[in-house]
Image: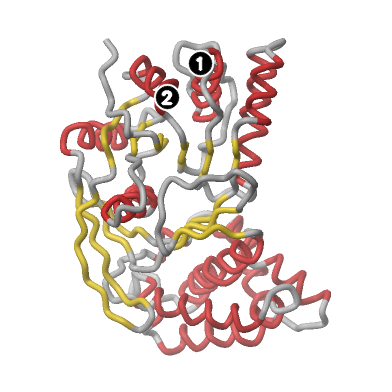
Amino acid sequence: MPRDIPAQASIIQFGTSRFLLGHVAAFVSASLAAGHSDQHILVVQTSSREEGKRKARALATQRTYPLHLRGRRDGRDIDERWTIDSVADGLIADEDWATLERHFVEHATHVVSNTGDAGYETSNDSCLAAVPSSFPGKLTKLLKARHAAGGAGLTLLPCELVSNNAQRLRELVVGLARRDYAGDTAFIDWLEAECRWANTLVDRIVSAALEPVGAVAEPYALWAIEDQPGLTLPCRHPDVMRVDDLTPYAMRKLHLLNLSHTFLVHRWRQAGLETQLAFVREAMAEPALFRALEQVIDSEVIPALATRLERHTLERYRDEVFERFSNPYLDHRLSDIAQNHAMKCQRRIQPVIDLAESAGIVTPSLIDVMRASEDYQ
């Protein structure tokens, strides 16, 4: 039996990850408190993971949860506890489909998602199933129901760490619609012309979950959203930015922040410090590791990236990254960063080497990382 969800829960958030709880939901909560917006969030658990289901059930009953911000930002120590009250309810898609579909059709205005590494996988899925197994399949079925009811197009703001995430999601949804709703050209036209698919880039380290629901996060945060005509955002916040082009933000994050993580892991392993150091903050406090990181960023990475981006923005972001990595309260495990190391080297480091080579810049330390990564294939 479908239950009633508050009509103001017009932001449909697919995913119960601690990241979304400490990032998007926190922005929406602050926007509500400041009187900048009036939209709340309906959280939807899309996978079969029991941990996610447990969090969705908790959000359906308690409606608020704690967010603990700890660290430094702009040279200032921050240790703050916030109560996040932007979530109006929680649903489990596999168990509450009728409720989700009705609310999506009648009240949704925005879709936000962060469905993990396999979130865009659609193998062997069908939108014609009672409840599709994949996130894109579920989304396509919901959009079809909304269109059939005469609903307006939505704004989709995916937060998955995928290049051009909204355009990729749009391709998947339109492809599923063409296959499973063949002949419904009006629906395809509606998806492509009436829905707004906005690429986004997110940046915040949310290091731990709180029980039964909540998160511990660093003070730094960014939600950059690529602007387009007619785009409306679900909230207003200093860390939510409309930008004309996501490329500079994506390059800085991937090739400064993410590259620095991967370089630290390489030197941590190379020095045989796996049993002595556990966290990024400990690596930053180890003089030899920090000096190596500082040297490679200043002499190899920034000169290479400066062939495409403004040097002063790179240097400012470098300083922010080092401040964030040194956060004494953040238990960011080097062993977690070390997972899929070879693949991360290819994405984070090899493009910088290629940029440098085309500009005649030598990158011996980066090349050393790539050579060593072959041992982790």
Which residue type carries mark 2?
Phe
User: Residue at the front extreme?
Assistant: 35
Secondary structure under tag 1 reads helix
Per the image, the residue denoted by label 2 is: 104
**Residue situated in front as seen by the camera: 370 or 111:** 111
Mark 1 touches mark 2? (CB < 8 Å)? yes
Which quadrant of the structure image shows residue 309?
A: bottom right
Which residue type carries mark 1?
Ala
Q: Rate crowding at label 1 as few (under 14), some (14 to 19) or many (20 or more) other CA atoms within 10 Å.
A: some
Q: Position of residue 307 (x, y in %)?
A: 75, 77
Please report the residue visible at 70 percent of the width from the left and 70 percent of the height from the top. 352
Q: Is 293 positioned to the left or the right of 186 in the image?
A: left
Q: Where is residue 308 in the image (x, y as percent from the top left)?
A: 73, 73
Which quadrant is the N terminus positioned in? Answer: top left
Per the image, the residue denoted by label 1 is: 145
Which quadrant is the C terminus positioned in? Answer: bottom right
**Residue situated in front as seen by the camera: 276 or 321:** 321
Q: Is 352 positioned to the left or the right of 123 in the image?
A: right
Q: Is residue 190 above or below residue 366?
A: above
Please report the residue visible at 46 percent of the width from the left and 62 percent of the height from the top. 222
